[in-house]
Amino acid sequence: SRYRLVAAVDAALRRLGTDYIDLLQLHAFDAFTPIDEVLSTLDTLVRAGKLRYVGASNFSGWHLMKSLGIAERHGWPRYVAHQVYYSLVGRDYESELMPLALDQGVGALVWSPLGWGRLTGKIRRGQPLPNNSRLHETAKFGPAVDDEKLYAIVDALDAVAAETGRTVPQIAIAWLLTRPSVSSVIIGARDEAQLRDNLGAVGWSLSPDQIARLDKASAVMPAYPYYPYRIQEGFARINPPPV
Protein backbone atom coordinates (compact mmCIF):
# COMPACT_ATOMS: atom_id res chain seq x y z
CA SER A 1 0.00 0.00 0.00
CA ARG A 2 1.00 3.64 -0.29
CA TYR A 3 1.41 3.92 3.48
CA ARG A 4 3.70 0.90 3.75
CA LEU A 5 5.81 1.86 0.74
CA VAL A 6 6.47 5.35 2.06
CA ALA A 7 7.18 4.05 5.57
CA ALA A 8 9.55 1.37 4.25
CA VAL A 9 11.52 3.85 2.15
CA ASP A 10 11.80 6.32 5.04
CA ALA A 11 12.98 3.53 7.35
CA ALA A 12 15.55 2.39 4.77
CA LEU A 13 16.90 5.92 4.42
CA ARG A 14 17.35 6.16 8.19
CA ARG A 15 19.11 2.79 8.37
CA LEU A 16 21.40 3.64 5.46
CA GLY A 17 22.11 7.13 6.75
CA THR A 18 21.52 8.65 3.32
CA ASP A 19 19.16 11.10 1.64
CA TYR A 20 18.16 8.99 -1.35
CA ILE A 21 18.18 5.47 -2.79
CA ASP A 22 19.69 4.99 -6.25
CA LEU A 23 17.48 2.03 -7.21
CA LEU A 24 14.50 0.67 -5.29
CA GLN A 25 13.23 -2.69 -6.49
CA LEU A 26 9.92 -4.28 -5.57
CA HIS A 27 10.71 -7.85 -4.53
CA ALA A 28 7.58 -9.38 -6.09
CA PHE A 29 4.31 -8.46 -7.78
CA ASP A 30 1.54 -7.63 -5.29
CA ALA A 31 -1.78 -8.83 -6.67
CA PHE A 32 -3.70 -7.29 -3.75
CA THR A 33 -2.61 -3.68 -4.25
CA PRO A 34 -3.72 -1.78 -7.38
CA ILE A 35 -0.83 -1.19 -9.77
CA ASP A 36 -1.83 2.47 -10.03
CA GLU A 37 -1.42 2.90 -6.28
CA VAL A 38 2.03 1.31 -6.29
CA LEU A 39 3.29 3.33 -9.24
CA SER A 40 1.81 6.65 -8.12
CA THR A 41 3.49 6.17 -4.74
CA LEU A 42 6.82 5.47 -6.42
CA ASP A 43 6.29 8.64 -8.47
CA THR A 44 5.74 10.63 -5.27
CA LEU A 45 8.95 9.21 -3.77
CA VAL A 46 10.96 10.01 -6.91
CA ARG A 47 9.60 13.57 -7.04
CA ALA A 48 10.47 13.97 -3.36
CA GLY A 49 14.06 13.09 -4.17
CA LYS A 50 14.02 9.94 -2.04
CA LEU A 51 14.40 7.58 -5.01
CA ARG A 52 16.28 7.98 -8.27
CA TYR A 53 15.10 4.90 -10.14
CA VAL A 54 12.66 2.05 -9.57
CA GLY A 55 12.77 -1.58 -10.59
CA ALA A 56 10.87 -4.84 -10.26
CA SER A 57 11.82 -8.36 -9.23
CA ASN A 58 10.38 -11.76 -10.15
CA PHE A 59 7.53 -10.30 -12.22
CA SER A 60 5.87 -12.34 -14.93
CA GLY A 61 5.80 -10.93 -18.44
CA TRP A 62 2.27 -9.58 -18.18
CA HIS A 63 2.87 -8.14 -14.70
CA LEU A 64 5.87 -6.20 -15.97
CA MET A 65 4.32 -5.09 -19.25
CA LYS A 66 1.10 -3.93 -17.60
CA SER A 67 3.10 -1.94 -15.05
CA LEU A 68 5.19 -0.33 -17.78
CA GLY A 69 2.08 0.58 -19.75
CA ILE A 70 0.34 2.18 -16.77
CA ALA A 71 3.47 4.13 -15.84
CA GLU A 72 3.83 5.43 -19.38
CA ARG A 73 0.16 6.41 -19.62
CA HIS A 74 0.38 8.54 -16.46
CA GLY A 75 3.90 9.85 -16.96
CA TRP A 76 5.14 8.04 -13.85
CA PRO A 77 8.64 6.53 -13.48
CA ARG A 78 9.00 3.25 -15.38
CA TYR A 79 10.77 0.19 -14.05
CA VAL A 80 14.28 0.41 -15.46
CA ALA A 81 15.56 -2.88 -14.03
CA HIS A 82 14.15 -6.34 -13.42
CA GLN A 83 15.77 -8.70 -10.93
CA VAL A 84 15.43 -12.24 -12.33
CA TYR A 85 16.60 -15.81 -11.90
CA TYR A 86 18.76 -16.79 -14.88
CA SER A 87 21.63 -19.24 -15.24
CA LEU A 88 22.98 -22.00 -17.45
CA VAL A 89 20.70 -24.42 -15.58
CA GLY A 90 17.70 -22.07 -15.64
CA ARG A 91 17.03 -20.33 -18.95
CA ASP A 92 13.26 -19.77 -18.69
CA TYR A 93 13.93 -16.01 -18.60
CA GLU A 94 14.77 -16.13 -22.31
CA SER A 95 11.29 -17.11 -23.53
CA GLU A 96 9.28 -14.00 -22.69
CA LEU A 97 11.05 -11.74 -20.22
CA MET A 98 14.21 -11.29 -22.29
CA PRO A 99 12.39 -10.14 -25.47
CA LEU A 100 10.25 -7.85 -23.30
CA ALA A 101 13.36 -6.40 -21.65
CA LEU A 102 15.01 -5.71 -25.00
CA ASP A 103 11.86 -4.17 -26.46
CA GLN A 104 11.16 -1.97 -23.44
CA GLY A 105 14.71 -1.16 -22.36
CA VAL A 106 14.59 -2.91 -18.99
CA GLY A 107 17.95 -4.17 -17.74
CA ALA A 108 18.17 -7.58 -16.08
CA LEU A 109 19.88 -7.97 -12.71
CA VAL A 110 20.47 -11.70 -12.37
CA TRP A 111 20.15 -13.42 -9.00
CA SER A 112 21.54 -16.90 -8.31
CA PRO A 113 23.81 -16.82 -11.38
CA LEU A 114 25.30 -20.15 -10.28
CA GLY A 115 21.95 -21.94 -10.33
CA TRP A 116 21.34 -22.37 -6.61
CA GLY A 117 24.94 -23.48 -6.18
CA ARG A 118 24.90 -26.13 -8.87
CA LEU A 119 27.55 -24.32 -10.92
CA THR A 120 30.10 -23.68 -8.18
CA GLY A 121 32.43 -26.38 -9.48
CA LYS A 122 31.62 -28.73 -6.61
CA ILE A 123 29.35 -30.98 -8.65
CA ARG A 124 31.09 -33.53 -10.85
CA ARG A 125 29.76 -36.50 -12.74
CA GLY A 126 30.03 -39.60 -10.51
CA GLN A 127 31.46 -37.72 -7.51
CA PRO A 128 29.72 -37.15 -4.14
CA LEU A 129 29.25 -33.64 -2.80
CA PRO A 130 31.80 -32.41 -0.24
CA ASN A 131 30.52 -32.92 3.32
CA ASN A 132 30.74 -29.20 4.15
CA SER A 133 28.97 -28.03 1.00
CA ARG A 134 25.83 -25.90 1.27
CA LEU A 135 24.62 -27.74 -1.82
CA HIS A 136 23.18 -30.44 0.42
CA GLU A 137 20.53 -27.84 1.29
CA THR A 138 20.45 -25.24 -1.47
CA ALA A 139 20.14 -27.73 -4.33
CA LYS A 140 16.72 -28.66 -2.93
CA PHE A 141 15.46 -25.17 -3.80
CA GLY A 142 14.64 -23.66 -7.15
CA PRO A 143 13.43 -25.43 -10.30
CA ALA A 144 14.41 -29.07 -10.63
CA VAL A 145 17.31 -29.85 -12.97
CA ASP A 146 17.64 -33.21 -14.68
CA ASP A 147 20.84 -34.93 -13.53
CA GLU A 148 22.06 -35.76 -17.02
CA LYS A 149 21.36 -32.23 -18.22
CA LEU A 150 23.25 -30.82 -15.24
CA TYR A 151 26.25 -33.07 -15.86
CA ALA A 152 26.31 -32.10 -19.54
CA ILE A 153 26.42 -28.42 -18.56
CA VAL A 154 29.11 -29.05 -15.94
CA ASP A 155 31.17 -31.02 -18.47
CA ALA A 156 30.97 -28.09 -20.91
CA LEU A 157 31.93 -25.65 -18.16
CA ASP A 158 34.89 -27.82 -17.15
CA ALA A 159 36.11 -27.94 -20.74
CA VAL A 160 35.93 -24.16 -21.18
CA ALA A 161 37.51 -23.60 -17.77
CA ALA A 162 40.46 -25.79 -18.78
CA GLU A 163 40.86 -23.88 -22.05
CA THR A 164 40.80 -20.46 -20.40
CA GLY A 165 42.53 -21.15 -17.10
CA ARG A 166 39.44 -19.85 -15.31
CA THR A 167 37.18 -21.45 -12.70
CA VAL A 168 33.75 -22.96 -13.33
CA PRO A 169 31.91 -20.13 -11.49
CA GLN A 170 33.83 -17.56 -13.53
CA ILE A 171 32.81 -19.25 -16.77
CA ALA A 172 29.15 -19.48 -15.70
CA ILE A 173 29.02 -15.79 -14.76
CA ALA A 174 30.98 -14.69 -17.83
CA TRP A 175 28.44 -16.52 -20.02
CA LEU A 176 25.61 -14.58 -18.37
CA LEU A 177 27.37 -11.29 -19.01
CA THR A 178 27.29 -12.05 -22.76
CA ARG A 179 23.51 -12.48 -22.78
CA PRO A 180 21.15 -9.90 -24.29
CA SER A 181 19.51 -7.55 -21.75
CA VAL A 182 21.73 -8.62 -18.81
CA SER A 183 23.09 -5.52 -17.05
CA SER A 184 24.73 -7.18 -14.06
CA VAL A 185 24.68 -10.21 -11.77
CA ILE A 186 24.14 -10.45 -8.03
CA ILE A 187 26.89 -12.49 -6.38
CA GLY A 188 26.01 -14.70 -3.42
CA ALA A 189 29.54 -15.29 -2.14
CA ARG A 190 29.90 -16.74 1.36
CA ASP A 191 33.41 -15.46 2.04
CA GLU A 192 36.16 -13.27 0.60
CA ALA A 193 37.70 -16.11 -1.40
CA GLN A 194 34.41 -16.81 -3.19
CA LEU A 195 33.89 -13.10 -3.79
CA ARG A 196 37.33 -12.71 -5.34
CA ASP A 197 36.77 -15.78 -7.49
CA ASN A 198 33.39 -14.55 -8.75
CA LEU A 199 34.81 -11.12 -9.54
CA GLY A 200 37.30 -12.88 -11.81
CA ALA A 201 34.46 -13.34 -14.30
CA VAL A 202 35.11 -9.86 -15.72
CA GLY A 203 38.05 -8.34 -17.58
CA TRP A 204 38.24 -11.02 -20.27
CA SER A 205 35.90 -12.62 -22.83
CA LEU A 206 34.67 -16.03 -23.86
CA SER A 207 35.21 -16.90 -27.51
CA PRO A 208 32.19 -17.28 -29.82
CA ASP A 209 32.90 -21.02 -30.03
CA GLN A 210 32.96 -21.37 -26.25
CA ILE A 211 29.70 -19.45 -25.91
CA ALA A 212 28.10 -21.65 -28.58
CA ARG A 213 29.13 -24.83 -26.76
CA LEU A 214 27.71 -23.59 -23.48
CA ASP A 215 24.53 -22.54 -25.28
CA LYS A 216 24.16 -26.00 -26.79
CA ALA A 217 24.81 -27.88 -23.55
CA SER A 218 22.25 -25.79 -21.65
CA ALA A 219 19.61 -25.40 -24.36
CA VAL A 220 16.00 -26.13 -23.39
CA MET A 221 12.76 -26.33 -25.32
CA PRO A 222 10.59 -23.37 -24.26
CA ALA A 223 6.97 -23.86 -23.27
CA TYR A 224 3.99 -22.99 -25.48
CA PRO A 225 3.46 -20.58 -27.19
CA TYR A 226 7.19 -20.08 -27.66
CA TYR A 227 8.37 -23.49 -28.83
CA PRO A 228 6.92 -23.25 -32.38
CA TYR A 229 9.17 -20.24 -32.98
CA ARG A 230 12.20 -22.37 -32.12
CA ILE A 231 11.43 -25.60 -33.97
CA GLN A 232 9.46 -24.56 -37.08
CA GLU A 233 11.26 -22.65 -39.80
CA GLY A 234 8.31 -20.48 -40.78
CA PHE A 235 7.63 -19.36 -37.23
CA ALA A 236 11.33 -18.83 -36.52
CA ARG A 237 11.71 -16.62 -39.58
CA ILE A 238 9.07 -14.13 -38.43
CA ASN A 239 10.07 -14.16 -34.74
CA PRO A 240 13.76 -15.04 -34.29
CA PRO A 241 15.24 -15.46 -30.80
CA PRO A 242 17.17 -12.57 -29.22
CA VAL A 243 20.89 -12.57 -29.97
Image (cartoon, grey):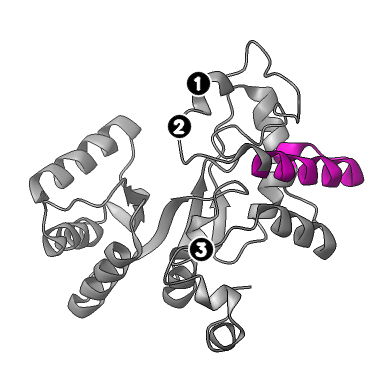
Question: Within 10 Å of the Cα at label 2, are there few (<14), some (14-19), or many (20+) other Cα atoms?
Answer: few
Locate residue 150, reporting x and y percent. 66, 40
For the record, the magenta segment spans 149-170
Front: mark 2 or 3: 3
Locate residue 10, reporting x and y percent. 20, 40
Which residue is painted at 70% across and 59% down in the image? 215
Residue sitting nearer the eye, 53 or 144: 144
Is 220 displayed left or right of 64 in the figure? right
Residue sitting nearer the eye, 80 or 104: 104
Marks 2 and 1: in contact by CB < 8 Å?
A: yes
Provide the secondary structure element on which disc 3 rests. Answer: loop
Front: mark 3 or 1: 3
Provide the secondary structure element on which disc 2 rests. Answer: loop
From what the image shows, is residue 124 above or below residue 104?
A: above
Q: Which numbered disc covers residue 102?
A: none
Provide the secondary structure element on which disc 1 rests. Answer: helix
Q: Quadrant of the C terminus?
A: bottom right
Q: Which numbered disc covers residue 137?
A: 1
Residue type at tag 3: Pro
Residue 241 in sight from this viewpoint: no
Q: Quadrant of residue 178?
A: bottom right
Is 122 displayed left or right of 22 in the figure? right
Q: State the separation of the CA atoms marked 2 and 3.
A: 21 Å
Which residue is painted at 67% across and 32% down in the image? 120
Q: Which numbered disc covers residue 141?
A: 2
Q: State the separation of the CA atoms marked 1 and 2.
A: 8 Å
Residue type at tag 2: Phe
Q: Main secondary structure of the magenta part?
A: helix
Residue picked out by circle 3: 222
Which residue is painted at 10% across and 48% down in the image? 1
Is 128 displayed left or right of 96 in the figure? right
Of pointers 3 and 1, the one earlier in the residue sequence: 1
